[in-house]
Amino acid sequence: PPGSVFKIVNGLIGLQEGVLTPGTQYPCHKGYVLGSLRVGCHNHPSPLNMYQSIMMSCNAYYCYVFRSIIDNPKYGSVAEAFDKWKECTESFGFGCKLGSDFPSEQAGTMPTKERYDKLHGKGRWKSISIISLSIGQGEIGCTPLHLANFAATLANRGFFYTPHIQKDTPEAPIDSSFKQRRYTMVDTSYFSEVVKGMYMAVNGEAGATARIAKIPGVVACGKTGTAQNPHGDDHSVFICFAPMDNPRIAVVAYVENGGFGATWAAPIASLLVEKYLKGEISPERAYLEQRVLEGNLM
């Protein structure tokens, strides 16, 4: 599962569908509660706007956002709104093969309305029935390549190139399909808004979930994720790119059974970015490099 990094996808779709603005506020009191349903969240200030929801990785905020997408009255039914959500999500590359030259590329998984009809009964499921999708859980599955591609899409403010291993040179040209921009269904103007939240997640103050990924002299943007795992410890996830303006690198770290996103994935990814951009690790982050090198999940 992609976990909380997927909240940004739902945020972008909410902006595109007109059910969310950057200033929209929702409450969170350690989670989203509706009747007997509870989607837990960590303790943080409430209410939050969209920027703060990314910075603090609020679960409740995206429960509200996702329900507003699926319950949008402009669609004739929940199933119709879900199909639109699915189409937008797939435009980011999720749920399908990206067409790269990576050997044995996997498509990941994406739920369908037919699957939910079978699970809950045709016409009987609602937005609350599939609320896990709001935070990147439930029936959606992806590969690290999907997440790296998503990070690059955010860095590019709305488009990506089909991922490829081979570098284009006159002696060994790559296929022209790898040079074509692939735009998502979300207007490019909305990407700068979520990037502000990703900047705050790394460079913000109290409540910022990815402060450990802050790099001296480099303005990085990122998003943590803690992907729930029913088979053991949660997975540690982090996507990022840098610099914020004119980005040169996008990275995803996914550490199975690694716990919180800030525990292992964020340090690993940020150290990779720092080494790539600066050629060395800053003395004040040497402790972090050592911790990662000596790390042991056992």
Image: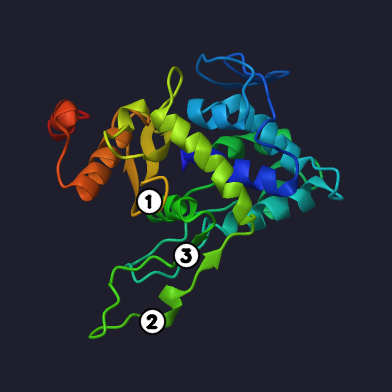
- The label on residue 91 is none
Distance Cα–Cα, label 1 vs label 3:
12 Å
In the rendered image, the residue lying farthest to the bottom is: 171
Name the element at disc 2: loop
The amino acid marked with disc number 2 is: Asp
Give the mark nearer the N terminus: 2 vs 3.
Answer: 3
Give the mark nearer the N terminus: 1 vs 3.
Answer: 3
Query: Mark 1 — residue?
Result: 144
Q: How is the image coloured?
A: rainbow
Give the mark nearer the N terminus: 1 vs 2.
Answer: 1
Q: Residues within 10 Å of mark 3 (few under 14, many from 20)?
A: some
Residue 182 position (above or below residue 59):
below
Would residue 3 be visible to someone looking at this image? yes
Would residue 137 be visible to someone looking at this image? no
- Residue drawn at x 14%, y 42% as measured from the top left: 280
The amino acid marked with disc number 3 is: Lys
Residue 234 position (above or below residue 190):
above
Residue 17 position, x and y percent, is 73, 48
- The label on residue 175 is 2
Judge from the rendering whether residue 22 lies leftward or rightward of residue 231; answer left or right: right
Query: Mark 3 — residue?
Result: 97
Q: Residues within 10 Å of mark 2 (few under 14, many from 20)?
A: few
Residue 84 position (above or below residue 272):
below
